[in-house]
Image (cartoon, grey):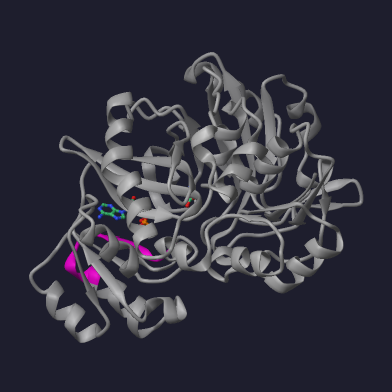
């Protein structure tokens, strides 16, 4: 089998790594990939949002399965386009990916179907949004559309909320993604990520994972794409997992099917857990990054039959085996991320770090250059380790992190250490 993985981050390296272990797979391409995927796959110089060029490539190279990482490609309809051309692609259609691509669509679907989430109002007029905020202080303002993970403003004061409305709706810093905003109630609790495979009707949950969104130790600083992740996440007890499936995942998949947007792919719920139970902060229409890194380390089953079953609607016949071990991924980032950062710094110590057993350095923003590896993004590497329990995995990951260096390296020192 010939597989094309679309994307070039840590998530895609983890997918390539896992897929490379499948006895069914003879050849892997990764577009555009990074210095890490290059060791296991043939990198292809096509950006993840070049849907037509990717389909041309897949046709020419007789690719049997395309696995899509990033949300932009899904929102652009990559899965639809592949299907129209008689190619197989794993992920939701553009219509189904609206669940991530439009907060307004997602919130309305949840409200109409009784899926627990924060109370909210939608505005398309900044003056009306401002008037509504006069009687509020702590509140969340979200751009409707995709904003590279930056469109949600957690506002402690009315002034911050007014500024969010101005940036999103008037300055249009996310372009047309800010034509509408969702203003929603502030939820207290603990966050956890819950990902499941979906085939339009059935679901198979993955093990719970937890990411660390804030840039600095102690959950301080600006939100990022994720500075680290671990699995399992003890916060999500088996009882709570059952509730998440019954109250959130199945009602959402059933509602999407009724709407004529059957959901196939990974359904990722960002959840807030409080004493009353789980509520949805957002849905993503894809594998999480960095959650995928520890999840792929723990998945014992072959990934390929599961991806195939999602496409074919036969997921109910599949089972997924997970390792009892814990896994943790420490993201190693460029100084300044999530703000401005430099690229092109030479990374040292990769080989030495990679020699440890039960450990993989997943690359994210890296590029190969004449035998060297250079930084080429904000999140650069994901040092990912397995261990008999979480503390053992953490020790192993940080031991390897200590061997890797570049000018301006920054990482959190408390990944996985948040109490459950
Ligand atoms: P989102 O992009 O919707 O997941 O939001 C990004 C982050 O903002 C989440 O991971 C939470 O930390 C925070 N957040 C979003 N919505 C809420 C909410 N209603 N209450 C509290 N925090 C929230
Ligand atoms: N880890 C957050 C995300 O993938 O969106």
Q: Quadrant of the C terminus?
A: top left
Residue 156 sits in quarter: bottom left
Left or right of 340, for residue 234: left
- Can residue 352 be seen? yes
Q: Quadrant of the N terminus?
A: top right
Q: Position of residue 77 (x, y in %)?
A: 58, 69
Left or right of 146, for residue 360: right
In the rendered image, the vertical position of residue 122 relative to residue 310, given as above or below: below
Residue 258 sits in quarter: bottom left
Q: Position of residue 267 (x, y in %)?
A: 45, 49
Q: Nearer the viewer, residue 139 or 209?
A: 209
User: Which residue corresponds to the image point at 65% horizontal and 64% vertical from the top-left?
Assistant: 83
- Can residue 402 be seen? no
152 inside magenta stretch: yes
Number of numbered tags placed on the structure image: 0
User: Which residue corresponds to the image point at 54% horizontal and 24% vertical from the top-left?
Assistant: 322
Q: Nearer the viewer, residue 268 or 291?
A: 268
Q: Nearer the viewer, residue 220 or 358?
A: 358
In the rendered image, the vertical position of residue 356 relative to residue 200, given as above or below: above
User: Which residue corresponds to the image point at 52% horizontal and 58% vertical from the top-left?
Assistant: 92
Q: Nearer the viewer, residue 254 or 27?
A: 254
User: Which residue corresponds to the image point at 57% horizontal and 55% vertical from the top-left?
Assistant: 91
The extreme top residue here reads 388
Left or right of 362, for residue 194: left
39 inside magenta stretch: no
Residue 218 sits in quarter: top left
What range is drawn magenta here? 150-161
Q: Position of residue 4 (x, y in %)?
A: 75, 53
Q: Position of residue 250 (x, y in %)?
A: 34, 45
């Amino acid at each position: 089998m010939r597989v094309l993985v679309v994307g070039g981050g840590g998530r895609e390296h983890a997918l390539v790594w896992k897929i490379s272990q499948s006895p069914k797979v003879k050849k892997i391409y990764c577009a555009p990939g990074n210095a890490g995927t290059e060791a296991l796959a043939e990198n292809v110089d096509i950006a993840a949002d070049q849907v037509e060029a990717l389909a041309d490539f897949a046709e020419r190279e007789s690719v049997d399965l395309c696995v899509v990482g990033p949300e932009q490609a899904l929102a652009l309809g990559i899965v639809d386009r592949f299907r129209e051309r008689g190619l197989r692609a794993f992920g939701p259609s553009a219509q189904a990916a609206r669940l991530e691509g439009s907060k307004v669509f997602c919130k309305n679907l949840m409200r109409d179907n009784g899926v627990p989430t924060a109370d909210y109002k939608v505005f398309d007029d900044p003056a009306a949004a401002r008037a509504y905020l006069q009687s509020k202080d702590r509140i969340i303002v979200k751009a409707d559309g995709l904003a590279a993970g930056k469109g949600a403003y957690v506002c402690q004061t009315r002034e911050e909320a007014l500024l969010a409305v101005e940036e999103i709706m008037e300055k249009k810093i996310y372009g047309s993604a800010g034509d509408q905003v969702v203003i929603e109630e502030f939820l207290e609790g603990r966050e956890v990520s819950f990902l499941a495979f979906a085939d339009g009707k059935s679901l198979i949950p993955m093990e719970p994972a937890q990411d660390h969104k804030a840039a600095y130790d102690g959950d301080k600083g600006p939100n990022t794409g994720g500075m680290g992740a671990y699995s399992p996440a003890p916060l999500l007890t088996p009882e709570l997992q059952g509730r998440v499936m019954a109250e959130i995942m199945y009602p959402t998949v059933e509602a999407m099917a009724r709407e004529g947007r059957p959901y196939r792919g990974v359904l990722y719920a960002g959840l807030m857990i409080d004493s009353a139970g789980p509520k949805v902060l957002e849905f993503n229409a894809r594998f999480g990054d960095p959650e995928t890194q520890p999840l792929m380390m723990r998945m014992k089953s072959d990934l390929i039959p599961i991806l195939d079953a999602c496409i074919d609607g036969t997921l109910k016949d599949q089972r997924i085996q997970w390792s009892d071990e814990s896994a943790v991924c420490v993201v190693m980032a460029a100084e300044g991320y999530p703000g401005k950062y430099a690229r092109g710094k030479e990374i040292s110590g990769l080989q030495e770090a990679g020699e440890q057993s039960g450990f993989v350095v997943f690359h994210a923003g890296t590029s190969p250059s004449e035998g060297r590896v250079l930084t080429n993004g904000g999140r650069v590497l994901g040092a990912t380790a397995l261990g008999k329990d979480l503390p053992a995995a953490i020790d192993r990951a940080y031991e390897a992190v200590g061997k890797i260096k570049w000018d301006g390296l920054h990482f959190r020192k408390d990944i996985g250490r948040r109490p459950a």
